[in-house]
Amino acid sequence: MNTDRKYADELDQQDKLSDFRNEFYTPDNTIYLDGNSLGLLSKRAEQAIHDMTESWKQFAINGWTEGDHPWYYLSENLGALTAPLIGAKPEEVVVTGSATTNLHQLTASFYNPVGSRTKILADTLNFPSDIYALKSQLKLQGYDPDGHLIQIKSKDGNMLETQDIVKAMTDDVALIVLPGVLYRSGQVLDMKTLTHEAHKRGIPIGFDLCHSIGSVPHKLSEWDVDFAFWCTYKHLNAGPGSVAGLYVNQQHFGHKPGLAGWFSSSKEKQFDMEHTLTPAHDAGAYQIGTPHLLSAAPLLGSLKMFREAGIENIRQKSLQLTQYLMDLVETELLEYDFKIANPTTASERGGHVYIEHPDAARICKALKADGVIPDFRKPNGIRLAPVALYNTFTDVWETIRILKTIMDEERFKHYENERGIIA
Ligand SMILES: *Cc1c(COP(=O)(O)O)cnc(C)c1O
């Protein structure tokens, strides 16, 4: 392991994606490693927000059909721009709602309990919002959420094993919802195998891609995944509260969505104002009401960068960054009780590194005081996300140097070992 700063410089010089960093606003004197919670603003996203307000100013009501990006078609057009990131057909994707409301919509559409097949299969490591949504959907159908939501357990508290998940795909399961990448440990689940096994048992399966989209390539159509959903403010850099997205496999086109609204309508029929819905014959059918255009606009700018950079190139650099970070943790921080708790194999590793330490909460506070932005996850985890589009190998090297100083000088002891309001 070469621990010289010079080596980080060399890696930066060889980096084919290095120009993209100049497209982003990076906070002054800060090493930002929290792009998996909130991605940074790019100049192109900012311009796209500006262009959207200009189109409102210039066209007023006619903006629905006029201008460079007519609002009436924007959700579908942004879906088509998103499709290459997840290996889907353009018409299988639409930008709409939030990750959680999309999960509600997709559960309302794909959860069809019949006979003794009434349960939903999820896991114990998923983000709480997904679990709340699934439990409330069970309740709406008249089932006891505690008995009807099966949550696959983890042996080590951080990772799930494919065979444990497959074993839980029993005859009473009507729907499976799992993350593509676990938000804490960054483990990439084997979506291909899980989909294959679910379908062998006749169970529809969907994935939450909040932590994988924009960081890890997917082949949803090829894997035959039934549905997926994600937010766009993490690796997709579309800003706080930006409009989310969903994917529905084309074999499910033509059905009415579980939660209907006038934007579920076929575009040609929508303004006929009939009281019987004619659903759109694509993923657009899973929209509900008027799109949140001001919060969708930034995606126009940010998705163009993904198209130019290429998700395979992004993944390659991301893996290099996380490997470099893990190597430095292992050589430089071994003596301080840190444990790498994400999968170390490249194919199972998402876009961030997850390290554990008993003083994690206050180490994060000390890092922030020294200009490094990580994020803390209870009880003892530190997530560090070096993002391919805007972080450098020097950022990683510098982070380790700062962390080593904090440990050597025990600077973390100036803080309480508790999380802040948002951590
Ligand atoms: C970030 C995240 C969410 C957030 O959902 P919102 O509806 O955007 O608030 C949901 N699920 C997972 C796995 C996440 O990582």
Image: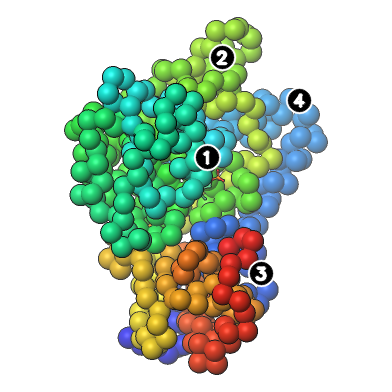
Residue 184 picture location, percent across and down:
43, 60
Is the C-beta separation of discs 4 and 3 under 8 Å?
no
Q: Secondary structure at mark 1?
A: helix
| Residue at disc 1, CB closer than 8 Å to ligand 1 | yes
Q: CB of mark 2 within 8 Å of CB of mark 1? A: no
Disc 4 residue crowd, few under 14, some 14–19, many 20+, Cα 10 Å: few
Quadrant in which residue 269 is drawn: top right
Neighbours of disc 1 within 10 Å: few (<14), some (14-19), many (20+): many
| Residue 123 on image: x %, y % | 36, 47
- Residue 26 is labelled as none
Please say whether residue 38 is visible from this viewpoint.
yes
N-terminal of the two: label 4 or label 3? 3
Mark 2 or 1, closer to the camera: 1
**Badge 2 is on which residue?**
268
SS for dot 4: helix
Q: Earlier in the sequence, mark 3 or mark 2?
A: 3
The residue nearer to you, when weighing 78 against 405, is 405
- Give how far apart the Cα atoms at labels 3 and 2 are: 46 Å
The residue type indicated by label 2 comes to Glu
Label ID, residue 27: 3
Describe the element under mark 2 as helix, strand or loop: loop
**What amino acid type is highlighted by mark number 1?**
Thr
Q: Which residue is mark 4?
A: 61
* Residue for point 35% across, 61% down: 158
What's the mark number on residue 100?
1
